[in-house]
Image: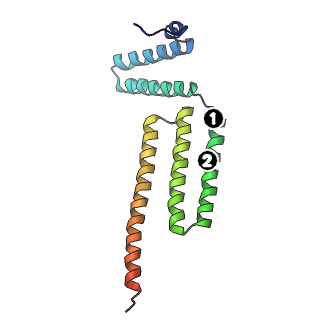
Amino acid sequence: MAPPRRIGTEKADKLPPTLSEQTHQQILDYFKVAADNSEHPAIRDAALDLIRDKTEFQHKQEARLSPTLTMTVSVCMIVLAGVSSWWFYDNYSERVALALSIIIFGLALVGVCLLAVFSGNLSQSNFVRVISMVWSKITSMLSRSKTDAGTDSSESEDSNPED
């Protein structure tokens, strides 16, 4: 027995592309024809650059978040990260506060980049690069603090002879 179909899904599946989408696709097709049929490398390179620029422009036009909202939320996240860092340094030892501050600023950076992806100002590949950079910074900081903690405990045992 086939699953029941929802009313209205046929229309949503068969909607023609909008006029702006048709125009965008037509311009991209013209650029592709120019890039494929041109004998001059400068014309091919210019056409490929225009294709890339038009595609980025189209993504920005289709963005769902306004630039004002993106900027406001990003500034709030950075200010909150700064205030939390100040609170960490006020209430914890310097080593713990530094570790927590790096983690908080890393999360704030990822949040800002996520907003930039949603607003159409950052590509997904660059977002992945930011996440890997933040992750490597946090893991190197944690591994360095573990080795420093082991070094400090051995130094403190050596510097305090109780004979």
Query: 1 or 52, which is in the foreground?
Result: 1
Identity of the residue drawn at 47% across and 15% down: 25
Q: In the image, residue 116 lies at what x, y percent?
A: 55, 37
The three-letter code of the residue at mark 2 reads Met
Find residue 124 and report its horizontal and vertical position in percent: 45, 35
| Residue drawn at (50%, 61%) of the image | 99
Tell me the quarter of the picture where residue 121 sits: top right
Residue nearest the viewer, comparing 67 with 45: 67
In percent of the image, x 54 and y 53: which residue is there?
A: 104
Q: In the figure, is residue 71 to the left or right of 105?
A: right
Residue at 47% across, 9% down: 4
What label does residue 67 carry, if any? 1
Query: Mark 2 sits on what residue?
Result: 77
**Which numbered disc, 1 or 2, marks the residue that appears first in the sequence?**
1
| Circle nearer the viewer, 1 or 2 | 2
Report the side of 4 relative to 72 (left or right). left
Among all residues in the image, which is located at the extreme front? 1
Q: In which quarter of the image is residue 52?
A: top left
Colour mapping used in the image: rainbow
Q: Looking at the rendering, in which quadrant would you find the N terminus? A: top left
Q: How many labels does the image show?
A: 2
- Three-letter residue code for mark 1: Pro
Crowd rating for badge 1 (residues with CA inside 10 Å; few <14, some 14–19, many 20+): some
Q: Is residue 45 above or below residue 109?
A: above
Alpha carbons under labels 1 and 2: distance apart? 15 Å
Q: Position of residue 17 (x, y in %)?
A: 52, 11
